Amino acid sequence: MNSIGEKISEVRKTKGLTQEGLAELSKMNLRTIQRIENNESVPRGKTLILICQALGLNSEDFIDMARQENKKSLENKIINFIFLVSVNIILMLIIGYLTLDSQANLNSRIGAFLLSFFIPVFIIYRTPSMTGIERLLKFGTGLIIYIIIALIFVNIGDTIKTGLIPCLLIALGVLYLGKDLLKIEE
């Protein structure tokens, strides 16, 4: 389903209008029309009514479309939140199991070090448009919480000796600096 901006752009083009022509007919700023068509803003109220009048459309149809888009947006935010929480918990469990488990040997600790590098690298390749701080906040929050919990409840010497804190710091560092380290272009 097209967004409101895409729908307005499509109708405007079928009527043979330029963005400047639509701005003039609707008595609006050209930049406002550009923002709406580029989905940088959503027209509401008087703005939507003026555009609909200029295009000869029913504004109620667009209002219903806007409501549906807002509903989808909320659903997407909830799904993204659940996904990010799950990813953070999985990262915490993997690194914790490989380093703190009583059966952990040198091989599992080396595996933890490798995973603490390669999992964030994978995340970086999948999210090239994110900044380091965005990536750190979305995918590293669980790791930051894990560091705090480990420092409070586990002896600091044990967390360093087992490799937990170094693994978590490597993962956080790669999430934050990875794009620069790997020379990834947007």
Image: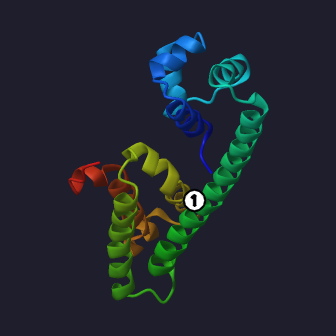
- Residue nearest the viewer, comparing 153 with 56: 56
Q: Residue at x 50, y 33 (%)?
A: 13
- Residue named by callout 1: 84
Indicate the amino acid at tag 1. Leu
149 sits to left or right of 49: left
What percent of the width, then of the height, locates residue 81? 63, 55
Q: Residue at left 20%, top 53%?
A: 183
Snapshot quadrant of residue 127: bottom left
What residue sits 41% from the left and 75% below the top?
162
Q: Residue drawn 62% across and 37% down?
A: 4
Q: Secondary structure at mark 1?
A: helix
Q: Is residue 180 left or right of residue 54?
A: left
Q: Position of residue 32 (x, y in %)?
A: 53, 19
Q: How many marks?
A: 1
Q: Nearer the viewer, residue 39 or 173?
A: 39
Residue 20 drawn above or below residue 151 = above
**Above or below, comparing residue 182 to residue 15 in the picture:** below
Percent across and percent down for residue 119 are 39, 69
Q: Is residue 104 visible?
A: yes
